Image (spheres, rainbow, N blue to C red):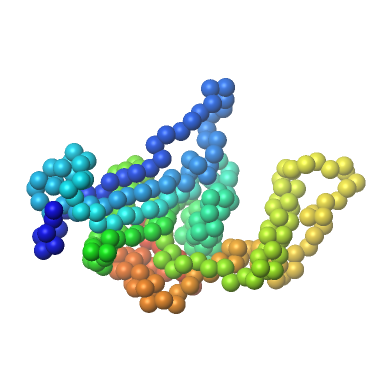
Amino acid sequence: MVKRNTKLQFVCADFSCKDNTIFDLDDDRDGINDLVDDCLVWTDITFYGIFSDEQYDKALEMDYRELAKLGRLTGRLILCKYILLEDSDPFEVCDAESAELGYAISVLTDRGGPLNRKTGDPFQDVFYIHELKMEKEYEKKSLKRRILIALPNLIFSFLHVLPEILACCPAPLICPLSPAESERYETLQKIASQKIESALGLGNKEPGNVVKFADSYQFSHDELNLVLGRGGLVPCLESKKTLKEYALYESAGFKKLGDSGLLVKQIVSVSPA
């Protein structure tokens, strides 16, 4: 067992990811069939502490039984470049996976965001950090900061892709909408979806003299704001713990993106860890 007063020498990062897939022998189509499944790469990294030369050797053999677990980071690599090359919308792909990812990508593509077509470059891959949770004994700012700084190198080492952007939202996302407002939001979203399908010539074909309700419906200003309002999600920044998390990420080079609660870090190139 490791003594508490033993100095931590190295950190071993162990990577877990979806490592299997199923394909249809009768399907001869090229390309990716499921953008959500294949372009949002789930990433799970567990960190172990190395306190001695013996443990270093064990880590090289991927034997972690005698190593102390330090913490765990989970996230998603969002392959925006490939999604766009497939003529798809990164927001739609992310939102189909979760409201949290949808919120993040919508903030990044807003005016002033790094993925905005006018103020940034949408052809950038993003790694979104869901959570960095340390074991109670190793809940130290300096250690978490070092992990965040090393993260681009770890992603490149494990996934062989260097994302241009790291992003996270340490604050919990809440929906302040009432039940009635939430139901109204869902209805308006369906109308908006039908409008898009109609404009693109998708969905069920109607006779030429039939006008769909969605096509004729005109959104009010308030309704348009609600539809475009990321599902009504807002970050809750009230707790001291949340503010400490923001300070931690900012010490590792992350910056707040407006008042969205989202933190971003632009990655230029891989550097020695």
Q: Residue furthest right?
A: 209
Rendering coords of residue 186 (x, y %): 68, 60
Rendering coords of residue 235 (x, y %): 49, 70
Q: Residue furthest top?
A: 26
Position of residue 1 relative to residue 144, above or below, is above
Q: Is residue 203 visible?
A: yes
Position of residue 197 in the picture relative to residue 68 (left or right): right
Position of residue 172 relative to residue 131, above or below, is below
Rendering coords of residue 252 (x, y %): 30, 65
Is residue 121 or residue 5 the one in the foreground?
5
Position of residue 45 relative to residue 246, above or below, is above
Position of residue 266 relative to residue 83, above or below, is below
Is residue 6 or residue 33 the one in the foreground?
6
**Which of the 4 image quadrants contains residue 177?**
bottom right
* Residue lying at 28% horizontally and 60% vertically, measured from the top left: 135
Q: Is residue 85 visible?
A: no
Rendering coords of residue 243 (x, y %): 38, 74
Position of residue 160 in the picture relative to residue 176 (left or right): left
* Residue lying at 37% horizontally and 73% vertically, measured from the top left: 241
Position of residue 62 in the picture relative to residue 161 (left or right): left
**Which of the 4 image quadrants contains residue 214?**
bottom right
* Residue lying at 42% horizontally and 47% vertically, measured from the top left: 42
**How many marks do you count on the picture?**
0
Is residue 72 or residue 255 the one in the foreground?
72
* Residue lying at 11% horizontally and 59% vertically, measured from the top left: 3
Position of residue 152 in the picture relative to residue 194 (left or right): left
